[in-house]
């Protein structure tokens, strides 16, 4: 691993996906989520059971998320209803406090942000279960990238696409703007190959999580987020030189406005 012999730090910011990145795929949340999406398509949208799984796969591949795909092909439904159906019944009890990850995060005095396609309620529930909700400066969630449009809003301000989500470049660019982050000094962690590839294309340094082997577009691969210190010892040596480092949690800085008790 290279060290940059310069007074300016190589990294200033760590940007983390949530699902299957900050907790492992083996938790079962992703499988449950996929089942809930299929149920939503059948029960709420009246899509025929035959071929629904294949349709979901096609939409997911082409549009980034199932929700984005369903909207793109003309289904109309309330985003909050979708999220509460799909995420509301996930087995959150499978997520346990993760003191190893918590200590890793808190010992790194860089900017740390979560960048998830999930809704705010889901993101905060999962982070709270993991006991790491106060380790991040900001959460970029579904609602951050897709704010509710005021009915009286000017048509010029309507979004050009129905849902903005990873892996589209526009999602990353919006996230950079909202969080005021420079991709060139940001290390991005995600378990999704296509998210990693877009991340690389928009200038991030990329870490594929959950795999031991790098893929095209990933600068690094990490079997588990717990291996951060072994994989990136320079993050800790950089932090030793960071005069502004203070090992404090961002208790009051989480920019989530909605209740997470729903
Ligand atoms: Mg993920």
Image (cartoon, rainbow, N blue to C red):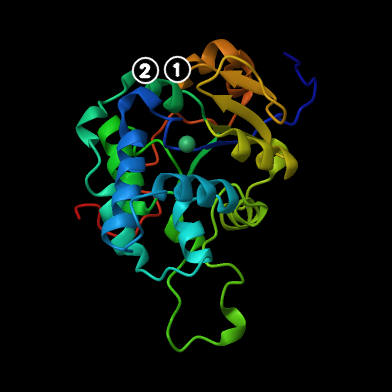
Residue 102 visible in the current orientation = no
Kindly state the secondary structure of the residue where label 2 is placed.
helix
Q: Which residue occupies the extreme front position in the image?
A: 50
Q: Which residue is mark 2?
A: 100
Q: Residue at x 66, y 20 (%)?
A: 214
Q: Position of residue 81 (x, y in %)?
A: 29, 63
Q: Residue at x 22, y 36 (%)?
A: 91
Kindly state the secondary structure of the residue where label 1 is placed.
helix
Where 123 sits versus 213, above or below? below
Q: Are marks 2 and 1 in contact (CB under 8 Å)?
A: yes
Q: Which residue is mark 1?
A: 226
Q: Residue at x 67, y 42 (%)?
A: 198
Whether residue 41 sits left or right of residue 247 in the image: it is: left
Q: Which mark is residue 133?
A: none
Say whether disc 2 or disc 1 marks the residue closer to the N-terminus: 2
Local packing at callout 1 (Cα closer than 10 Å; few below 14, some 14-19, many 20+) is some
Q: Position of residue 177 (x, y in %)?
A: 63, 57
């Amino acid at each position: 691993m290279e060290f940059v012999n310069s007074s300016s730090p190589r990294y200033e910011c760590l940007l983390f996906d949530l699902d299957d990145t900050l907790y492992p795929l083996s938790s079962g949340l992703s499988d449950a989520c996929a089942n809930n999406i299929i149920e939503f398509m059948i029960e709420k949208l009246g899509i025929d059971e035959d071929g629904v799984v294949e349709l979901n796969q096609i939409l997911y591949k082409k549009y980034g998320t199932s929700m984005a795909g369903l909207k793109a092909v003309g289904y109309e439904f309330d985003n909050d209803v979708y999220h509460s159906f799909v995420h509301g019944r996930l087995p959150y009890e499978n997520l346990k406090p993760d003191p190893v990850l918590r200590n890793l995060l808190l010992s790194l005095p860089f900017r740390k942000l979560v960048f998830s396609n999930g809704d705010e309620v889901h993101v905060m529930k999962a982070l709270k279960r993991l006991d790491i909700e106060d380790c991040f400066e900001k959460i970029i969630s579904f609602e951050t990238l897709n704010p509710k449009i005021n009915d009286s809003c000017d048509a010029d301000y309507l979004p050009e696409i129905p849902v903005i989500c990873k892996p589209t470049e526009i999602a990353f660019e919006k996230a950079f703007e909202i969080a005021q982050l420079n991709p060139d000094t940001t290390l991005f962690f995600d378990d999704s190959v296509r998210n990693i590839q877009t991340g690389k294309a928009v200038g991030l340094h990329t870490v594929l999580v959950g795999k031991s082997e790098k893929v095209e577009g990933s600068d690094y691969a990490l079997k588990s987020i717990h291996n951060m210190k072994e994989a990136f010892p320079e993050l800790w040596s950089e932090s030793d030189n960071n005069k502004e480092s203070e090992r404090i949690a961002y208790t009051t800085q989480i920019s989530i406005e909605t209740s997470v008790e729903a």
